[in-house]
Amino acid sequence: MTSLYASLDKARPYILSIVRIVVALLFLEHGLQKFFGFPVPGPAQLPPLLQVQGAIEIVGGILLLVGAYTRVVAFILSGDMAVAYFMSHHPRGFFPVGNGGDAAILYCFIFLYFVFAGAGIWSLDRVFLKQE
């Protein structure tokens, strides 16, 4: 049983990188939808707050995707998602399943995890900043 855990521990930095990349791509889609209507059409008219949010999603998603300044970016995105939840979703009801805030909460906490875990082995942080 110990060898199983040892094998799993060896894969940890790679899995962390894969999770970071997938989360970044999913998050990036939200910004691309707002500005470019890709991969699905977004709102026709974007109020200024959603324009700022879209920019945060695009820039933050790209930085997280390549693993650049991951801990700082993840901290900002975690706070961003907490604010988004309480501004947009919580007023519609208490439970996330009812107010549509599931994704915002999940993003908030996975970004918070990246603050502490870092970017993983496949990242610019590791290459240029010598971070693990």
Image (cartoon, rainbow, N blue to C red):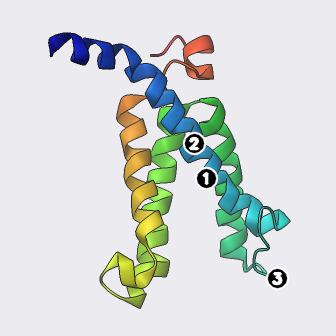
- Marks 1,2: beta carbons within 8 A: yes
Q: Nearer the viewer, mark 3 or mark 2?
A: 2
Q: Amino acid at mark 3?
A: Ala
Q: Residue at x 38, y 22 (%)?
A: 12
Residue linked to disc 3: 44
Query: With 111 as the anchor, is 49 left or right in this view?
Result: right
Horizontal and vertical percent for residue 101? 43, 73
Viewer-side residue, 49 vs 18:
18
Q: Secondary structure at mark 3?
A: loop
Taking the view exactly as shown, the residue that stands out farthest to the left is 1
**Neighbourhood count class around disc 3 (C-alpha, 10 Å): few under 14, some 14–19, many 20 upward:** few
Mark 1 to mark 2 CA distance (whole Å):
6 Å
Q: Residue at x 16, y 12 (%)?
A: 2
Query: How many numbered tags mark residues here?
Result: 3
Mark 1 to mark 3 CA distance (whole Å):
21 Å
Horizontal and vertical percent for residue 105? 39, 63
Label at residue 26: 1
Which is nearer the N-term, disc 3 or disc 2?
2
Residue linked to disc 2: 22
Q: Residue at x 44, y 71 (%)?
A: 85
Horizontal and vertical percent for residue 76? 50, 49
Q: Amino acid at mark 1?
A: Leu
The part of the image, by quadrant, that contains residue 75 is top left
Q: Residue at x 65, y 31 (%)?
A: 66
